[in-house]
Each structure stands twice: as structure tokens, then as C-alpha cells.
Image: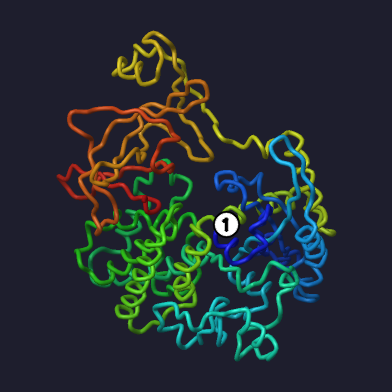
Amino acid sequence: MMVFMQSRIPFFSQNVIKLILYIDDFEVTNPLSPKAGTHKLGGVYFTLANQHPKFRSSLDNIHLLAMYNSSDAKLYGYGVIFEPFINDLSSLAREGMDITTPVFTGNVKVGIAQVVGDNLGMHSLFGFAEGFTANYPCRWCKMHREEIRLSVVEKVQLKRTKANYEVDLNRHNLQETGIKADCPLNQIEHFHVINNVAPDIMHDLLEGVCPLELKLVLHQLIQQGFFTLDTLNARITSFNYGAPDSRNKPCVFSQHSLLHPDGAASQKAGQMWSLMRHITVMLGDLVPEENEHWEVLLLLLECMDFIFAPVISKEDTIFLKHLMKDHHSLFLQVFGERHLKPKHHFMTHYPKAIQALGPIKRFWVMRFEAKHNFSKRLSHIVCNFQNIAKTLSYRSQLLLCHNLLSKKHMKGQDVEVGPGSSVVVASLDNAQFLSVSLGVALYDEVYLANWVKVYGSKYQSNLMVVVSKSDEGDIVFGKILHVVVVESTVTLVYQKWLTIGYSRHFHAFEVQPEQPHSIGITKVDNLIDFYPLHAVKSYQQYENLYYISLRHRVG
């Protein structure tokens, strides 16, 4: 991201605090109550792009910038709401502020790196068409909605630029340009909406394309007689999701939802992500290979592997572009009566966005949306809605004051050790190996924790981790046996598992324990991928295989 901004915007080649802004509306009352909409608020939050992502995802490092009544934004416009912020930021961008610390002394300026949010909120703030059935519903290009329905690739010649943006803005014709008004943030010298390329992968995929295509595919597979709705729901409820997905177990499907796939998603974003990653293992044994509807799902999952990856190369983005083209083309071919949705079209801009910003998962809104929970809970406790925005803002500032004084935001929850017990190394299996590897005497005590959280990732026994890669480039998995904590250093003792291969039909790695059993040891910091995983037993009878579905592509 820094390379892109420095090459395209000279302002960011200086010492600059780079802000990532998030804007969204939320309800503080029951959305089904008669008061729904009356107290609807808009929240603007920010975090610092300069921070490492492992700190940026902490709610303590996401700060409230502004809170307003949503009705005021519609009545008076965003210019009035953002005016104080624009004035302050323009001053900070122009004059900066002098900072003196033990490690740095100098003048630092402040600027907006990117603005993120759901598509409706972004289009509303940026002044683009808010209805996605508009003639020009895309904020990145000027493709007409009729062409969007059939276009499977990004067309560079239709890209919005500062020049054509100014021309379209002066035409004052929403139907022919897709631009309703100028964005107030464009008053800031270094910022322009055209350079804001961060997409919204949570709403585009997990609450858009994924539920739509999953329901379409499942309906067709049921119609073809591979399984019934009861079988599908039985497997969803009985599937072994393991500890990593225990809080995001998906809900069952109704007949109505499969018959009306364009309706509201029956799953939350976290549930849909869990279901998408496991559905192929869940049903793969019931569906024959080379099924064209199943292939649509597999291509979508392969696209998601790259989109959600924390590390991605330029070559990967080129491959992703062709992968998306194949997926969109097959979708139009298999579901001939349907057309591509605007969110399908937004996906075609992802490769360019990744080349500009790096991994776009760093800009998704999942963690920002979790920040709403503080205001929602507090409003139910306060139960006084006279100027509720002021009340919530004041309490948020008190919380920030507490975090600053306690230096909680600086400490973070880097390592959180759960309950456990101290044991003598000699009492453990493979004691001699552990003694040498841990660097302790055979009769020293070490602390075995039931679980440990490292920057939010929870490690415990029986979970799988990616420990290394073989000389051939294959991923090597290990099953955690013990979580050892020695002087704040977290070490995992694992049983080595053999990777049989990758099954594209199941979109998962086929693994089994090494015979004879052997163990290894690694520090959490040395893992190839920091997300703990879960191995699922194959549904196929007499097959002694386990399947592991990754959260994203491991480079």
C-alpha cells in the first residue's frame, strides 16, 4: 500500500500518519420495533495504516471520529457533518505536528490513506449513484448496467479518472454519469475518490455473491437427486467444525430460501465464510466429479483463496483475473436464465485493487462493524435517547481515555495464557527430545497451557497448524499435542501428519498421521500460517483420510 501511495501521491512520500476511515449507519434500537429508523446513527471510525495488521484489528486501536443522526446526513448532506474534520485534517496535512519521542523527533503530517465501508455507504458519501440498478452503478468504472450483467472482465478503457470525473460532475446528470454530487472529502488536497480503490469484500462476497451462488448450486444439486434438503441440513448441523469455527456454525436452509436465492442471506458473514470453506468436504462425497454446478462453487472458492490471502504477489493477481473470468463465464453458462450482479462486477476490479493496496483483506470492514457493538450495548443500558449520539460519543471518549492512561492500546493482547499446569519434562512422552528442543533440563518444570491466544489466534491441543513446507513445496501440517509456555515464549509440540495431496473436488488437503508417530516442535512465530485449523474425517466409508480446508491460499 505504501509503495502505491508514494508513487501516485507525492504527499505520502513524507513522514505521514495514514488514516483508514470507515463509515456506516447502524441501529441502536431493535430493528424490528416501531422506533426502527428513528434513532438510526451514522458512525465514522478510523485506524492507522502505519500499524501492523495484528494491532490494527484490535478494537482498542479502532477509534471513533464522529457520530451523527443518519437523518441529518440525508437532510443537510455530508459536507456539513465532515466540515470540522476536513478543516482539521487540511491543517494537519499542510502544517503537520511536531513530535518528540525517544526514537523519533520531527514534523509528522496526517492524511487519509483509504476510506472503507459498505457499498451503499461509500456511494452515499462519495456522491455516486446509491441505487445499484442505476445506469452506472460502479464507482470505479463507467460501465453501463446492461453491459455489467454480461461482462466477465474489467475494461481499463472505461476506468474513472480525475479528468472524466470532473467532466461528469459538471454535467449534473446522474442517469448518464452515475455521479450525483461531489464528495466533501475531495476538498482535502491529497485525497480524491478516484484514488480510493479499497473494495468491500465482506459485503461483496460473504453477504452477496457467496449466499446467492451457494443457494443456486445447492438447489440444482438437490434437483439432480444427489441429496435431499433434509440430508443437507443434517450434515450442516452435525458437521464437526472444530474449535476455530465453533462460534460461526452456519444455520440450516429452508425450502423457501433455496427457491428464492435473491432474498436476504440466512447467514451472517462469519457463518457464510465458515460454510463456504467446509461445504465441499461436507457434501463432496455425494456429488460426482466434473459436475458443472459444483464447478461454479469450486471456482468461486479458488477466487476467495487469493482474495482473502494475507500475502499475494503481482503474478497471483494476474492469475486471479483469469480465474474470475472463468468463474463469471461458467456462471452465465450454467445459470443461463440469470445475469451477473453488480457485486460480481465489483470483483473484476479486485486484481487492480490488490496491485495498488496489497492484500485487500487488510481493508475489509468486519472488525470495524464489531466496533458498533459498544454503542449498541450502551444504548440499551442507558435507555435515554435524548441526543443519544452525544451520549455514545462521550462514553467512547471515556473508554479511550481509560485505554490511553492504562496504555492498554500499546500493550495489546499479544499473548494471553489460559489455565494449565506445571509438569516435569521427564513425565512427558519423548522427554529427551523435548528437553533438548526446549533448552531445559530433563527434570525442570514447564507450563502446559490448556490454550493460548497470540494476537487473537487461539491455540490448543488437537488443532492443526501449518508448520512448514516440504522440499517439493507441499504444505506440512502438524496436530498440536501440547502448548508449552516458557518465559512468555509460546511453543507448540505437535504430531507430524503426512500430506497425501490436494483434492480439488473437496477443495481441501488430504492428510493422515505419519506412521510410525513422530513429533516436532515449533514456536508460534515460526508458523507458515498463523490461523489454527481443524481436520475433518472423511464421510467416505473405509477411507482413513482427513480433510483440512484452509482459510486462504498459503504462499
Place of residue 29 in the rendered image (x, y in percent of width and height, measured from the top left): 71, 59
Using the rendered view, name the quadrant where residue 521 is placed.
Answer: top left
Q: 479 or 19, which is in the foreground?
A: 19
Q: Relative to residue 192, is residue 406 depicted above or below?
A: above
Q: From the viewer's perspective, tell me whether residue 273 is left or right of residue 77.
A: left
* Tag 1 secondary structure: helix
Q: Relative to residue 60, is residue 263 depicted above or below?
A: below
Residue labelled with disc 1: 2
Q: From the viewer's perspective, tell me whether residue 541 is left or right of residue 433.
A: left
Q: From the viewer's perspective, tell me whether residue 310 is left or right of residue 480.
A: right
Q: From the viewer's perspective, tell me whether residue 65 is left or right of residue 386.
A: left
> Which residue is painted at 73% across and 53% down in the image?
64
> Which residue is painted at 68% across and 72% down in the image?
125
Q: Residues within 10 Å of mark 1 (few under 14, many from 20)?
A: some
Q: Quadrant of the N terminus?
A: bottom right
Q: 477 or 238, which is in the foreground?
A: 477
Q: 399 or 237, which is in the foreground?
A: 399
> Which residue is painted at 44% across and 67% down in the image?
351
* Dot 1 amino acid type: Met
Using the rendered view, name the quadrant where residue 34 is placed.
Answer: bottom right
Place of residue 279 in the rendered image (x, y in percent of width and height, measured from the top left): 34, 57
Applied colour scheme: rainbow
